[in-house]
Image (cartoon, rainbow, N blue to C red):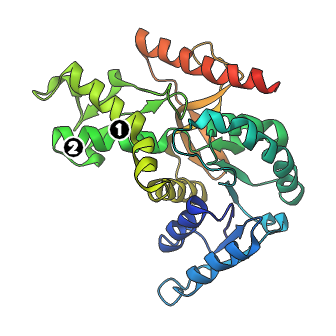
Amino acid sequence: MSKIAIIGAGFVGSTAAYALFIENTCEEIALIDVNKEKAEGEAMDLEQGMMFRPETRFEYGDSYELCKGADIVVITAGLAQKKGETRLELVKKNAKIFREMIPKIVENNKKCVIVLVTNPVDIMTYLTLRYSGFPKERVFGTGTTLDTARLRYFIAEKYKVSPQSVHANMMGEHGDSEFPVWSRATVGGLNINEFDEYSEAMLEEIHKKTKNAAYEIINRKGATYYAIGLVIAQICDAILSDEKRVFPISTYLENYYDESNVCLSIPCAIGKAGICRRFQLPLNEKEQQQLHASAKVLKDIINELGE
């Protein structure tokens, strides 16, 4: 049986479980949370919809033993981002949690793929690699996949097409230093600068809206969880079905435009064993500078942590 363990039954974890459930992604979902009653409540709520989705069964609890047998362990646990707080400000608090948590996961499951969602996701991905000892192919973060979905939505809105007809990526840190790869962005196969709607001011507006999207939602409702729940479900489906679908995910870099020893988002193909291929996009000079700037932000944080 295919199994996904979700650590953290808060807004993001429970929404991810719901998305996995309605998509029939796997046969078993385990919800793990330090608040066992919260995990139980979420599992009960989902189980009562099994008349409509009988293929999935649920486990819940506060024990990491529930990770046993899981093909994928999704980590959403950690302190949430507060109003006015950047993702990187969370790092010291969540790093402490991970030092204790990751060895407990590994103790119960040494063969799973670990998908990081907890922010700041690039730093948490880097730390999870260190604390787990897993190969870099089996530990990665959701990275800029959601940012890319937002970018494509805002481009589609301007060009009056479906987001599925837009091909563009956000790369770098999942945070304030992320950047759009405009040089490779297309709509219906045409470069975005080949349309009457195109202008530099429009691109800057779209970039700003994409970068600030999470802050705008947090200011209005306190948290973001629906769209990231869908991201998690899509990534998990790509793993279990060995789809080799390409996502811009946070992964450990080795000599990527001379950047190494840092995790940030680049396009990667995902399959049953995790990352099966990394793509080095031909970035222009400005985009390469943005990549290096993003890597520096993250490396500075890692150095501050002493990791």
Q: Secondary structure at mark 2?
A: helix
Looking at the image, which residue is at 70% across and 70% down? Answer: 30
Q: Amino acid at mark 2?
A: Glu
Q: Amino acid at mark 1?
A: Leu
Who comes first in sequence, dot 2 or dot 1? 1
Residue ranking furthest to the bottom: 51
In the displayed structure, 139 sits above or below 7; it is above
* Residue 1 is at least partly visible in this image: no
Q: Is residue 125 left or right of residue 248?
A: right
Position of residue 244 measured from the top left corner of the image (x, y, whole percent): 53, 47
Q: Which residue is mark 1?
A: 151
Identify which residue, 145 or 236, lies in the foreground: 145
Q: Where, quadrant-wise, is the N terminus in this rendering? A: bottom right
Q: Which residue is mark 2?
A: 157
Badge 2 local density, few (<14 within 10 Å), some, or many (20+)?
A: few
In the displayed structure, 256 sits above or below 219; it is above
Position of residue 34 measured from the top left corner of the image (x, y, whole percent): 77, 64
Looking at the image, which residue is at 26% across and 37% down? Answer: 155
